[in-house]
Amino acid sequence: MNAPQRKPSPELSRRRLLQAGAAGATLAATPFAANIARAQGASIKIGFLAPLTGPYATEAQDQVRSAQLAIKDFNDAGGFNGRKAELLVRDDKLNPGEAATRTLELIEKDKVDFIAGSLSAATQLSMNAVTRERKVIFVSISQSDAINEAKDWSPYTFHEALNPHLTSGAVARYAFPKYGKKIVYLTADYAYGHEMVRGFERAGKALGATTLADIRHPLGTADYSAFLPRIQALKPDILVLCNFGKDLVNSCKQATDFGLKSTTRIITPVLLFTARLAGGADVFEGVVGGTSYYWGMESTIPSAKVFNDKFRKAYGGAVPSDYGALGYAGVRSLLQGVLNAQSTDNTKVADAMRRLKYDWYKGPQFYRECDHQSVQSVIIVESKPASAMKGKDDVFDIVHVDPASEANLRSCTELGFKA
């Protein structure tokens, strides 16, 4: 599922990323003279977990690439009092137990200062459980509703990604009034899929939408043919693909081949740049979904142009993906917290991050005080037909932007925080 512009195989790319993370690639700058003694062996270590193997590997590799770019930015600017940053990359294999083990290893064996990463609603919760107990900052860069709830949250938990309530609500408010109110969900049977359906149904209730069925499939399903006749028989106005990565590509391709688009509009909460590249124009033509970022925003958002140009320079002209950009933002927010706090003490850095007002790549963002959710825009995109593309990466039209607003989030009281 690699993007066409990247020639190395997924396995080769994965090995290189692991090697680069382990070796602390991009860290070969000389510390300031006044801090030579302190800086030697005293890098600021950020543990970074992502599923570099498995169905989300392509997206995970982009997360790592962008996170390394944030490390490079920090180091090129002189670091913190001459101390450089280092990214220690680990493969969580999309497994919560593996994620917890690697997180604990990074904290206790590798002595990392902070943790970032994840690309699963489940792995991020297991990572957060470890960091919460040890009072280590964790910046999650994957969608989850639960991580913001008081029962799972801690003062050291920051959620840089969109969450399912925010994403699905934005897509529902755009799509349901336009395409119809009879909805079928094809749902990956784990937290991501469940939370997305909940968000759609909640937004849809106010819009008069009706759920005809929520059809669930295992993570990593290759054959969706058994589900398609049932979906067709239900005659929905809209089919919502509540899945991700290769699951999204495979289900969308098979739904298209089955002819569902002739009677039903296909939408998805998260329309991935990498999935669109892998699936192709014909498979995704007309599909509408949400995203945290699309590189085409550079025509109207200056910070997007700056970020894209850095990425192009670093990676042979490639453009960053949506989840890749989250890797950049999560690590950069951490390092800005270090600079603002003038410390690597986790309590002081967390306090500094709570006060951040930032624009790293997509426009203004800030962390909400009660739960440290990054308040940000949701971009609604529609996949272009091949005839409308002006280059291999010109895959989406931006059809709507839900601006950053706390009003689009669940309230702090609903999440379990006391007023």
Image (spheres, rainbow, N blue to C red):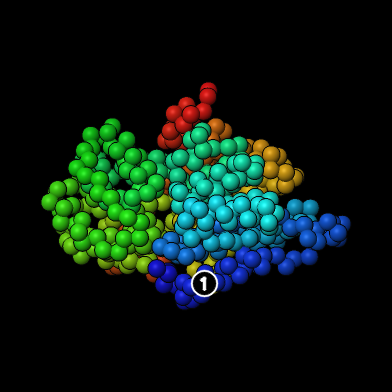
Q: Is residue 397 left or right of residue 332?
A: left
Residue visible at 64% across and 43% down? 134
Helix, strand or loop under label 1:
helix
User: Residue 275 lies in what quarter of the image?
Assistant: bottom left
Q: Position of residue 292 (x, y in %)?
A: 45, 50
Residue visible at 29% across and 38% down? 201
Q: Position of residue 329 (x, y in %)?
A: 56, 52
Residue visible at 50% across and 53% down? 97
Outermost residue to the top: 419
Q: Is residue 404 above or below residue 289?
A: above
Outermost residue to the left: 233
User: Residue 181 lies in what quarter of the image?
Assistant: top left
> What residue sits right under mark 1 in the picture?
13
Report the quarter where the N terminus lies.
Answer: bottom left
Three-letter amino acid code of the residue under disc 1? Ser
Q: Position of residue 62 (x, y in %)?
A: 50, 62
